Image: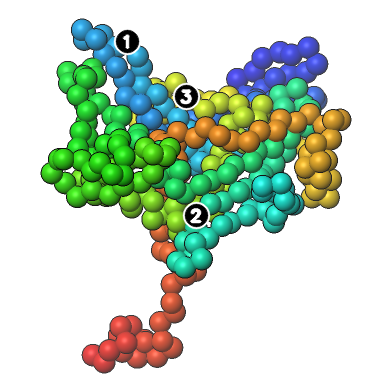
């Protein structure tokens, strides 16, 4: 156990499974935690590489970018203890609606758009109760187009550095509806800014991936939108306040270390509900940050979709969802068939 002196008491480092927790002690009593050094592992789906390193003449001129996943933020929140709650309502086109507000296709019932608002309540490093209020308008069509455009922009890398060649040159082309591409492929037009739009080649495997993601948005749009909002609240709350991390290799594992602030408190549900009401009304006496999320990268959204699908699979594979065998299964060797 490492120790260091503070003016108003001893500062002690306690080692836990998730990292090092710094606490103050007075006499034999452990006081409220000050901060924790948390370990995030790629293998545990805490972090992911959002951009590869860039090299020139054999030297790294731009390091790889590593970001935190939703699971990673949940891990960090073990110390930050930020309570994330849904606001009572959300304003859509000037009209107050239930939160989240979901728009569905009248014929297929597939999700077309989601409006969601959530508020994260927790302590800042200075010990002040802070509310982070986030609203997201998640338009399924817009993010479908954005994912295609991201694929169109990707370039080939050769010798550890980018080239001027496109990685997916025949996946899609910008143009107008009345002028289809004169290139081999199976083409479909999606409008962006009239009269312009994107011709996609749905014979290209990367476009098939985009279409698959689009199907997942239509199925799980409300869950995806809520997950995006929650991770952005944790990313911006001063108790955590980080999105990109410095990656290291420790004993052959991809890991990043993040320092998180956290306080033990006696706040109970009625207290949190009261703060939620104050934050929802924009009370000036409460330290708060309000934002409408407008900039979600295609890579971040794709990562959230993948995490949502993994959660869905885990829920389906959960023992709680498995059907019980027939009562007399044991009479037939457990398989339901006579031996």
Residue drawn 59% across the image and 42% down it: 136
Q: Is residue 239 left or right of residue 176?
A: right
Q: Is residue 261 left or right of residue 153?
A: right
Callout 1: SS:
strand
Picture quarter containing residue 232? top right
Callout 2: SS:
strand
Callout 3: SS:
strand
Could you say which disc has been placed on residue 61 in the image? 1
Residue behind mark 2 = 112
Residue behind mark 3 = 245
- How dense is the environment of label 1, judged by Cα within 10 Å: few (below 14), some, or many (20 and up)? few
Q: CA distance from mark 2 to mark 3?
A: 34 Å
In x, y percent, where is residue 336? Answer: 32, 87
Q: Is residue 93 above or below residue 60?
A: below
Could you say which disc has been placed on residue 267 in the image? none
Picture quarter containing residue 129? top right
Q: Is residue 43 left or right of residue 28?
A: left
Q: CA distance from mark 3 to mark 1?
A: 18 Å
- How dense is the environment of label 3, judged by Cα within 10 Å: few (below 14), some, or many (20 and up)? some
**Front residue of 84 and 33:** 84
Mark 1 and mark 3 in contact (Cβ < 8 Å)? no
N-term mark: 3 or 1: 1
Residue 29 visible, this orientation: no
Quarter of the image with the C terminus in it: bottom left
Q: CA distance from mark 1 to mark 2?
A: 42 Å
**Front residue of 163 and 305:** 163
In x, y percent, where is residue 44? Answer: 42, 40
């Amino acid at each position: 156990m490492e120790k260091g002196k503070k003016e108003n008491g001893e500062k002690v480092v306690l080692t836990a499974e998730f990292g090092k927790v710094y606490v103050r002690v007075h006499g034999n009593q452990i006081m409220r935690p000050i901060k924790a050094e948390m370990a995030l592992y790629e293998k545990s789906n805490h972090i992911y590489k959002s951009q590869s390193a860039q090299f020139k003449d054999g030297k790294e001129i731009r390091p790889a970018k590593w970001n935190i996943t939703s699971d990673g933020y949940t891990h960090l929140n073990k110390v930050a203890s930020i309570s994330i709650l849904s606001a009572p309502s959300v304003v859509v086109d000037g009209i107050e609606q239930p939160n989240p507000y979901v728009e569905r296709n009248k014929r297929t019932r597939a999700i077309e758009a989601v409006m969601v608002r959530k508020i994260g309540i927790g302590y800042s490093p200075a010990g002040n109760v802070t509310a982070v209020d986030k609203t997201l308008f998640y338009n399924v069509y817009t993010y479908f187009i954005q994912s295609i455009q991201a694929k169109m922009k990707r370039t080939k890398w050769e010798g550890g550095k980018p080239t001027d060649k496109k990685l997916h040159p025949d996946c899609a082309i910008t143009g107008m509806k009345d002028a289809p591409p004169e290139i081999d492929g199976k083409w479909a037009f999606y409008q962006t800014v009239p009269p312009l739009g994107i011709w996609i080649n749905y014979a290209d495997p990367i476009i098939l991936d985009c279409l698959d993601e689009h199907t997942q948005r239509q199925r799980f749009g409300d869950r995806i939108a809520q997950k995006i909002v929650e991770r952005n609240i944790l990313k911006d709350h001063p108790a955590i306040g980080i999105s990109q991390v410095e990656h290291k290799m420790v004993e052959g594992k991809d890991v990043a270390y993040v320092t998180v602030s956290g306080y033990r408190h006696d706040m109970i549900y009625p207290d949190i509900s009261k703060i939620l009401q104050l934050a929802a009304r924009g009370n000036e006496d409460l330290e708060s940050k309000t934002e409408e999320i407008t900039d979600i990268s295609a890579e971040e959204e794709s990562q959230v979709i993948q995490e949502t699908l993994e959660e869905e699979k885990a829920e389906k594979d959960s023992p709680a969802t498995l059907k019980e065998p027939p009562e007399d299964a044991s009479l037939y060797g457990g398989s339901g068939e006579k031996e």
